[in-house]
């Protein structure tokens, strides 16, 4: 598992990367009440705003961590946004991306580095 | 940045794990570890304890309470003179154009009037009162008392354990009570749509009383986040958002707060700032109205979202002034202003969120039925 400074986690699954938000991010957001996901098939560039997530407090964006194609999205969190708070690093994954350049993964933090990052 | 102020319950908030944020010059808990949704639901189901000590508490005294009431009637369009001892009313300070300077609660406490005003407006309100009413009326801002609110269907049962007399109080009654040795000025009122009490106590006894209330199984601490979602579902205005200096009472849906005696044809009609504009709007009907709004989807429509009559094209017809997710409704809810001819419940409109026009419907307020003990 790799982590971004935007508090996303990235997990390799075959030639795809599964992306979600960390437990730390979910806790900071508070109760999630709305998630808007991209259409599968969307081509995205690193740092594009691809997901809108709204908590009881505020709206935030989730950025694409890699260049590539969104191949699958998790409709379960659209139907039940509270899942993001309940199981952010498991059931509540956001999307799966097929990266154009898998080496972009190398720039991200490992678990220990992310732990230091969030203090 | 000037240093933020702290309420007498600041240390208790930290001990309870409150997440502190700046609000109206104070450092206040926006939530506790339970989170906004759980705190909201707890208040609707049991009883929530809110620290509202940042709000302004003001005492007005004069030759007698009638003289003070007559003086206050020159600043607010409410019937103050006929307010019986031990009763409280909702009021509005107005500017010369009839715009709302602040909203407030005022109570007849026998030999004086007791006012509670918004934190962000309190310095301005006190200056306004002093400029207009002194020296005949003395205006004293009370800074040595905390204010807390105990809200929810179990609030009465909880407070009855401290003072059985609270069971006899009706909505908007005020009394001085002895709560386990603490002198408390209690009103049966609140800002959640639930039954409950607002309790003013000496600052140096506030933490002790708060701890005793929180020791009760039914009581949990509630932050500003849930306070906002509770009042929004209850259809209650937040000053500076749903009402401000550019809003007249009529268009804000607050005409009910202006009693007949102060309206055109009443025994004490007018005689308050902006009376001509305010009374004309009540008589003729406003051009725009504050309404409830129910977005059809799950996307919250927050303050600032522009409202359109059509799915495409055209200029905005209104704007959301408060909005978010309503935990008790289980869906997004909002309030905003729309033209009077689009203000009927059921009118389909659109709110523009992130560049997309999403359907919404004008809805009756409140979104959840009030649960007051009338």
Image (tube, grey):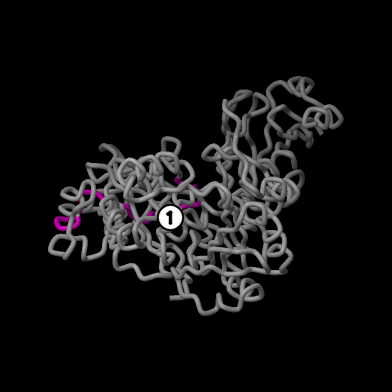
Q: Is residue B195 visible?
A: yes
Viewer-nearest residue: A32 or A28: A28
The residue range painted magenta reads B282-301
Name the residue tied to disc 1: B115
Residue at image coords 56%, 52%: B52
Residue occupying image coordinates x 34% and y 58%: B63
Give the x, y percent position of residue A41.
58, 35
Neighbor class of circle 1 (other Cα within 10 Å; few <14, some 14-19, many 20+) is: many
Q: Residue furthest right?
A: A112
Which image quadrant is residue B201 in? bottom right
Q: Chain of mark 1?
A: B
Q: Where, quadrant-wise, is the N terminus of chain B in this rendering?
A: top right
Give the vertical position of A36 relative to B214 (above or below). Answer: above
Measuring from the top left, give residue A19's x and y in whole percent: 71, 36
Locate residue B274 relative to residue A86 in the image: left or right: left
Position in image of residue B274 (x %, y %): 21, 46
Tell me the residue at 58%/41% (across/down).
A53
- Identify which residue, B239 or A62, lies in the foreground: B239
Kind of element beneath mark 1? strand
Is B267 situated left or right of A43 in this image? left
């Amino acid at each position: 598992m790799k982590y971004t400074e935007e508090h996303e986690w990235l997990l390799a699954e075959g030639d795809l990367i599964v992306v979600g938000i960390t437990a730390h991010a979910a806790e900071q957001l508070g109760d999630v009440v709305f998630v808007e996901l991209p259409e599968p098939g969307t081509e995205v560039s690193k740092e594009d705003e691809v997901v809108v997530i709204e908590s009881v407090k505020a709206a935030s964006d989730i950025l694409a961590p890699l260049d590539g194609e969104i191949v699958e999205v998790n409709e379960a969190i659209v139907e039940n946004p509270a899942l993001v708070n309940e199981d952010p690093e498991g059931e509540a994954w956001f999307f799966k991306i097929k990266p154009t350049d898998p080496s972009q993964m190398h720039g991200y933090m490992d678990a220990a580095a992310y732990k230091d990052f969030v203090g | 940045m000037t240093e933020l102020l702290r309420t007498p319950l600041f240390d208790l908030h930290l001990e309870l794990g409150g997440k502190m944020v700046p609000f109206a010059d104070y450092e206040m808990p926006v939530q506790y570890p339970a989170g906004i949704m759980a705190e909201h639901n707890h208040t609707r189901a049991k009883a929530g304890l809110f620290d509202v000590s940042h709000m302004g508490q003001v005492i007005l005294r004069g030759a007698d309470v009638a003289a003070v009431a007559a003086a206050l009637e020159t600043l607010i369009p409410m019937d103050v003179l006929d307010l019986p001892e031990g009763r409280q009313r909702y009021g509005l300070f107005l500017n010369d154009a009839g715009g709302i300077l602040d909203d407030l609660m005022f109570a007849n406490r026998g030999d004086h009037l007791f006012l509670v005003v918004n934190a962000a407006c309190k310095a301005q309100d006190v200056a306004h009162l002093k400029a207009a009413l002194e020296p005949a009326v003395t205006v004293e801002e009370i800074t040595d008392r905390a204010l807390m609110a105990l809200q929810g269907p179990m609030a009465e049962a909880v407070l009855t354990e401290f003072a059985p007399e609270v069971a006899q109080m009706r909505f908007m009654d005020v009394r001085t009570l002895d709560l386990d040795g603490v002198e408390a000025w209690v009103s049966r009122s609140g800002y959640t749509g639930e039954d409950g009490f607002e309790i003013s106590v000496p600052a140096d006894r506030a933490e002790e009383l708060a701890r005793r209330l929180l020791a009760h199984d039914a009581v949990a601490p509630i932050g500003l986040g849930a306070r906002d979602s509770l009042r929004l579902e209850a259809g209650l205005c937040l000053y500076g958002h749903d009402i401000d200096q550019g809003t007249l009472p009529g268009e804000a849906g607050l005409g009910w707060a202006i009693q007949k005696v102060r309206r055109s044809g009443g025994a004490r009609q007018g005689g308050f700032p902006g009376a001509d504009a305010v009374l004309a709007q009540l008589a003729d009907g406003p051009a725009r109205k504050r309404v409830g709004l129910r977005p059809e989807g799950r996307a919250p429509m927050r303050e600032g979202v522009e409202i359109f009559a059509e799915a495409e094209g055209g200029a905005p017809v209104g704007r959301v002034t408060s909005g978010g997710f309503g935990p008790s409704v289980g869906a997004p809810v909002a309030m905003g202003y729309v033209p009077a001819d689009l203000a009927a419940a059921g009118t389909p409109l659109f709110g523009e969120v992130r560049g997309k026009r999403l359907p919404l419907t004008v809805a009756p307020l409140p979104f959840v039925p009030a649960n007051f003990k009338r």
